[in-house]
Amino acid sequence: MVWRSLTQSTGARDRRADRRPPTGLPSTAGMAAEAARAVGWVSTGLLAFQFLLGGLMTVARVPAAVAGTQHLGSPLYFGLILGTWKILVALAIVAPRTPRLKEWAYAGIVFDLTGAFVSLAASGDGVPLQTA
């Protein structure tokens, strides 16, 4: 009885094959999943590019980045710390097979953007809200 259970297939492979669409016809669910995946990668790529570019500008101490840091009342070394973390975040969200790292990277993005919003609001310039 044990030998028979070890030598026989569980049938899981056969059941999975039954759920696949016919080979000649594309599945609309599959096409929707591919579109969603493409949108996810494009938005992740744009976000990574924005954080990488912002981090590089801050670390390189581009005059506009330095002026923005000083305007908010932060010391220059604070920009170096944030710029380094932004670069690391950009690399983390595009790194493959690192779900825990990506989770913390996205949390860091939320902290960064929340801090930027509060810093801008506290600087006296007001928060730029557009109304239609």
Image (cartoon, rainbow, N blue to C red):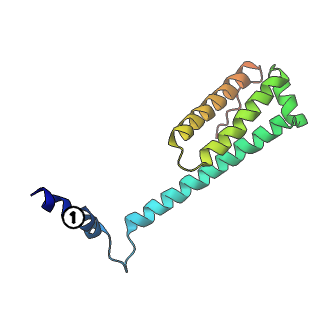
Q: What is the quadrant of the N terminus in the image? A: bottom left
Q: Which residue is mark 1?
A: 9
Would residue 112 be found to the left or right of residue 69 on screen? Answer: left
Query: In the picture shown, does residue 7 fall above or below 45?
Result: below
* Callout 1 amino acid: Ser
Q: Residue at x 76, y 44 (%)?
A: 53
Query: In the picture shown, does residue 95 fall above or below 18?
Result: above
Q: Residue at x 67, y 23 (%)?
A: 118
Query: In the picture shown, does residue 111 fall above or below 9?
Result: above
Q: Residue at x 60, y 51 (%)?
A: 43
Counting the numbered discs, the total is 1
Front residue of 43 and 128? 43
Furthest toward the bottom, the residue is 24
Front residue of 99 and 127? 99
Q: Residue at x 56, y 50 (%)?
A: 96
* x, y percent for residue 100: 51, 38
Q: What is the quadrant of the C terminus in the image? A: top right
* x, y percent for residue 63: 90, 35
Would residue 54 be found to the left or right of residue 27 on screen? Answer: right
Callout 1 secondary element: loop
* x, y percent for residue 61: 87, 34
Front residue of 4 and 110? 4
Query: In the picture shown, does residue 73 fall above or below 63?
Result: above
* x, y percent for residue 12: 24, 61
Residue 59, by quadrant, is top right
